[in-house]
Amino acid sequence: MVEGLRPTIPPECPDSYRTIIENCWNDDVEVRPTFDYLLKEFEKMRTTTFSKFINSFKDYKGFQSGQVQYFDQVKDF
């Protein structure tokens, strides 16, 4: 933040990320999210986003079963 101005959030930024960014930029320090809250939100976003990514591959008919198994192992990491 410079002189009360913030960078432009790119339009392709997911809404969940945009909300967190904007909340962190709140002028009132007491309203800004805590680090614990941010960790929980990022973990929810990570698991949700990754699950959607994996499921999109599983739904793709041409995807090889060995690759799906690999992604299942990575997901559980």
Image (cartoon, rainbow, N blue to C red):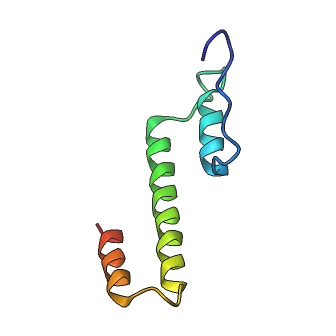
Classify 68 as above or below 22: below
Residue 61, percent across and down?
52, 90
20 sits to left or right of 48:
right
Instruction: Identify the residue at horizontal 46%, vertical 63% (top origin).
Output: 47
User: Which one is nearer the viewer's eye here, 4 or 57?
Assistant: 57
Classify 2 as above or below 75: above
Residue 14, percent across and down?
63, 51
In this view, which residue lies farthest toward the front?
62
User: Which one is nearer the viewer's eye here, 65 or 49?
Assistant: 65
Q: Quadrant of the N terminus?
A: top right
Residue 72, percent across and down?
35, 78
In this view, which residue lies farthest toward the top?
3
Q: Quadrant of residue 21?
A: top right
User: Which one is nearer the viewer's eye here, 75 or 58?
Assistant: 58
Instruction: Identify the residue at horizontal 49%, vertical 79% (top origin).
Output: 57
Classify 43 as above or below 49: above
27 sits to left or right of 49:
right
Instruction: Identify the residue at horizontal 54%, vertical 85% (top origin).
Output: 59
57 sits to left or right of 32:
left
Q: Quadrant of the C terminus?
A: bottom left
User: Which one is nearer the viewer's eye here, 63 or 34?
Assistant: 63
Query: How many numbered marks are there?
Result: 0
